[in-house]
Image: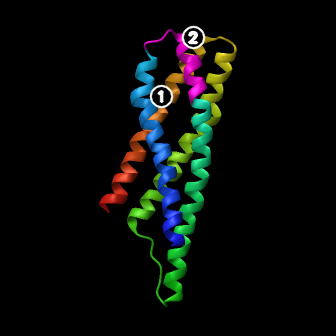
Amino acid sequence: MFYSVVKFIHVIAVILWVGGMLFAHCFLRPAAAQLEPPVRLKLMASVLGPFLNAVLVAIVLILLTGMSMIGQEASQAVRTGGAFFMPLGWTLMAAGGIVMMAIFGHIRFALYKRLATAVAASDWPKGGQAMAGIRRWVGVNLVLGIAIVAIVFMA
């Protein structure tokens, strides 16, 4: 039962992260593109701040639950006299997740900071540059996230 709860939290955190990127990249961003730069950049900064904070919490949950599930499986293997070999799908998921987390760190702590600073200073060209970087890296992370989910379900 404990394993199922941990796995549920893990999956919900992944859904928040990947689903949020899908929504922002494919639906919010194109709709916001219809707005003038000052309004668009203020909107995106206002939406991205809380979303990126929620993703930071999700990442912590993903790491903790992922390590817990791996640890539980390894412990069970040892208790039953076997050896634990992490499945390839899990290895790819963990490695891909670490790459995604590094990209997230760049988005949250560098690019979003530039966006927020530019919006506060009403520097719309710099805000647009920061937003272009965010859009590009969110697109990369979205593709990685979908690929990882596909690998897990098809492996």
In this orientation, does residue 141 appear?
no
Q: Residue furthest left?
A: 154
Q: Position of residue 99 (x, y in %)?
A: 51, 48
In the displayed structure, 134 sits above or below 38; it is below
Q: Residue at x 52, y 77 (%)?
A: 74
Left or right: residue 42 compared with residue 29: right
Quadrant in the picture for residue 122? top right
> Could you tell me which quadrant the C terminus lies in?
bottom left
Q: Amino acid at mark 1?
A: Arg
Q: Between disc 2 and disc 1, whose residue precedes?
A: 2
The disc placed on residue 38 is: 2
Q: Position of residue 97 (x, y in %)?
A: 49, 52
**Residue tagged 1:** 135
In this orientation, does residue 99 appear?
yes
Q: Position of residue 148 (x, y in %)?
A: 40, 52
Q: Residue at x 50, y 23 (%)?
A: 132
Q: Which residues are magenta?
A: 34-47
Left or right: residue 98 compared with residue 92: right
Say what secondary structure mark 1 lies in.
Answer: helix
In the displayed structure, 57 sits above or below 127; it is below
Left or right: residue 17 compared with residue 119: left
